[in-house]
Structures are given as structure tokens and as C-alpha cells.
Image (tube, rainbow, N blue to C red):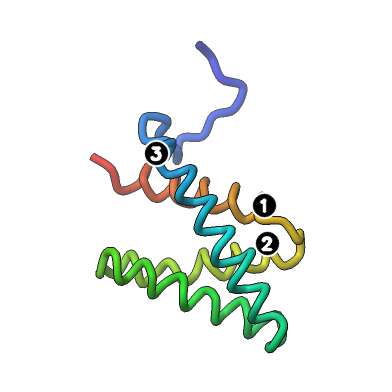
Amino acid sequence: MLSALYLPFLNFSVFPTNQVVQILAEEIFFRGYIQNELLKIYNPFKSIVLSSILFMVAHLILNPSIFSGLTIFPSIIFGYLYFYSKSVISSFIFHLFSNWFFLSQFSN
């Protein structure tokens, strides 16, 4: 079957279908709850950075590696997407594609 969209950087055999629920739960917790609570105390920048640090720490606890430490960078983007869209759907979609891209590059 031909595709109208060619994405050579995404490996369709490693689409993170088993992670969809986990990614949605992470976005609801870290953006929908933690970031929202931090926004009651801090400015948007500080709340996004603090929630991203917590996101990174959670990943480091589960898998202590450099890649887990680097999750802070996409997490900041997830935070801004959530802040400006006021919806976890935008951060969820970007998170899903980020994981898919990572798996495509580092699988095999």
C-alpha cells in the first residue's frame, strides 16, 4: 500500500501502541495535575520547568540512563504545548510522536 506521506525518520514497525495509555497517563498527571498546581504558585516558565524536572526524575528512577535524563527537554515542550493549548491532547500527541521518533532511531 502506498502512503501519501513519506516519513523516513519514523519506523512504523516500532509504533508505540503499547505506550499510548502510559503516555496519556503521564500527560494527565504531569501537565494536567502537577503543572496546573504549580501554576497556582509560580509563573508559567517556572511551573513548566519544575514539572519537567519531576518528569525527568520519574524517568530516571525507572531507568537510570542518560536518555532518561534528557527527557527534560521534550518535557519542557510538552509543558508549553499544554500551557498554550489548555489541553493534554496536544502534549499527548507530541509526546507520542517523540517516543515514536526515539524508538525509530534507537531500535534494532
Residue 3 % position (x, y): 56, 20
Residue 81 % position (x, y): 68, 61
- Name which residue lies at 36% across and 35% down: 14
User: Which quadrant does the C terminus fall into?
Assistant: top left
Q: Of helix, strand and loop, which one carries label 1?
A: helix
Label 3 belongs to which residue? 18
- Name which residue lies at 63% across and 85% down: 46
Residue kind at label 2, given as amino acid type = Leu
Residue 38 % position (x, y): 64, 81
Query: Marks 2/1: CA distance?
Result: 6 Å
37 is higher (above) or lower (below) than 88:
below
Q: Of helix, strand and loop, which one carries label 2?
A: helix
Q: Residue furthest top?
A: 1
- Which numbered disc covers residue 81? 2
Q: Mark 1–mark 3 contact, CB under 8 Å?
A: no
- Name which residue lies at 72% across and 56% down: 87
Q: Of helix, strand and loop, which one carries label 3?
A: helix
